[in-house]
């Protein structure tokens, strides 16, 4: 499936989305932390790379979730990969009756 920008953010875990100059900002429900996704063109293989300002580590995880793949051919598909790198673990924790907390978001120490 090719994801659009709108469908990539059509996730029940997301409270709000804003476009930025080089990507997007979004907020998870119950967590007042701005998460940034920076998209850039991949000049070597084509498509788009993404970087996240934060990774997620819920109490159910031993460590932060670092996405294994940070690239895709289409902009919407790369954006979808970035979004689910955060929302998938968030939703699993909420389904386990954990209350969302800002400490679940671990800043990307390499910067964005």
Image (spheres, helix red, strand yellow):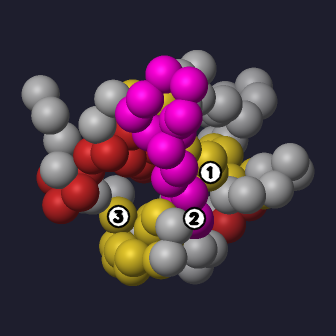
Residue at 53% across, 58% down: 37
Across and down, in percent, residue 17 comes to 36, 74
Which residue occupies 27% across, 46% down? 76
Q: Which residue is mark 3?
A: 14
For label 3, count other residues whose C-alpha is less than 10 Å away and answer few (under 14), some (14-19) or many (20+): some
- Residue 95 placement, left or right of 42: left
Q: Are the two marked residues, 1 and 2, in contact with CB atoms closer than 8 angstroms?
A: yes
Residue 108 vertical position relative to residue 101 in the rendered view, above or below: above
- Residue 1: within the magenta? no
Find the magenta span and give its range. 35-49
Q: Position of residue 10 (x, y in %)?
A: 20, 57
Q: Residue furthest left?
A: 1
Q: Is residue 4 in sight in this rendering?
A: yes
Mark-to-mark CA distance, 2 and 3: 13 Å
Gap in Å between the C-alphas at discs 1 and 2? 6 Å
Question: Which of the two marks, 3 or 1, is nearer to us in this view?
Answer: 1
Residue 39 falls inside the magenta stretch: yes
Q: From mark 3 to mark 1, how far is it between C-alphas?
A: 15 Å
Element carrying mark 3: strand
Q: What is the magenta segment's predominant secondary structure?
A: strand
Q: Earlier in the sequence, mark 2 or mark 3?
A: 3
Mark 1 or 2 closer to N-term?
2
Disc 1 marks which residue? 52
Q: Residue at x 62, y 74 (%)?
A: 33
Location of residue 6 with respect to 42 vertically, above or below: below
Who's the residue at 14% across and 34% down the image?
A: 2
Describe residue 80's horizontal placement relative to residue 11 as left or right: right
Q: Label 2, secondary structure: give it.
A: strand
């Amino acid at each position: 499936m090719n994801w659009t920008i709108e469908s990539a953010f059509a996730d029940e875990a997301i409270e709000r989305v804003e476009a930025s100059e080089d990507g997007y900002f979004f907020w998870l429900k119950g967590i007042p932390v701005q998460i940034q996704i920076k998209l850039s063109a991949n000049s070597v293989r084509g498509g788009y790379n993404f970087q996240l300002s934060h990774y997620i580590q819920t109490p159910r995880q031993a460590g932060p979730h670092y996405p294994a793949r940070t690239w895709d051919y289409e902009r919407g598909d790369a954006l979808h990969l970035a979004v689910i790198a955060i929302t998938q673990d968030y939703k699993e924790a909420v389904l386990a009756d954990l209350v969302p907390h800002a400490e679940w978001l671990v800043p990307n120490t390499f910067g964005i």
